[in-house]
Image (spheres, rainbow, N blue to C red):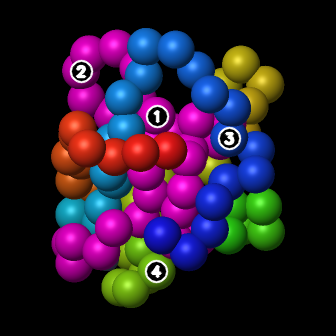
Amino acid sequence: MLYKNPLYRKKRNTYPLQVSCGHCKTSIAIYAKGGKGNLIKMQLPRIIESQIDLKRNKGHLRCTNCRRELARKGAYNENITYWIIRGKVNTKRLDNYRI
Ligand SMILES: [Zn+2]
C-alpha cells in the first residue's frame, strides 16, 4: 500500500481486512474490522493503510485503477467514514498481516 494512515488508531478485537475493487480486483485498503458480518463502512481511524492518500481525498472513494466509485464519504460517530456501495468491493481477512 502506498499510504500509511496517520489517523489510524489501534482498536481491540479487530482484525485486518483487505478491501479491493470488486471490478478490477485492485487492492484499495487494509481495514481494522470489528465484529461479524459484511463490511458496511470504513471509519477513517480504522483504515490502517491505503492506496489512496486519505488525508487529501476530498470526495468519495474511487478505485485507483479503474476509477469506479466504491464508497461514499460521510460520517459515523463524528469520524469521517466511507460507506461501502453494496456489491462494489471484495474483502479478504488477512491472518498473517503485521501492522
Ligand atoms: Zn477497480
Image position of 23 (left or right of 10): left
- On whether residue 37 falls in the magenta region, the answer is yes
Q: Does label 3 or label 2 sit earlier along the sequence?
A: 3
How far is mark 4 from mark 3, CA to CA?
A: 21 Å
Q: Position of residue 5 (x, y in %)?
A: 67, 54
- Residue beneath disc 1: 32
Is 19 above or below relative to 66? Answer: above
What numbered label is drawn on residue 37? 2
The residue carrying mark 4 has its beta carbon less than 8 Å from ligand 1:
yes
Question: Residue at image x 39%, y 86%?
Answer: 65
Stretch of the chain drawn in magenta: 23-52
Q: Does label 2 or label 4 sit earlier along the sequence?
A: 2
Ligand 1 located in image quadrant: bottom left
What numbered label is drawn on residue 64? 4
Of labels 3 and 2, the one closer to you: 3
Q: Quadrant of residue 20?
A: bottom left
Q: Does label 2 or label 1 sit earlier along the sequence?
A: 1
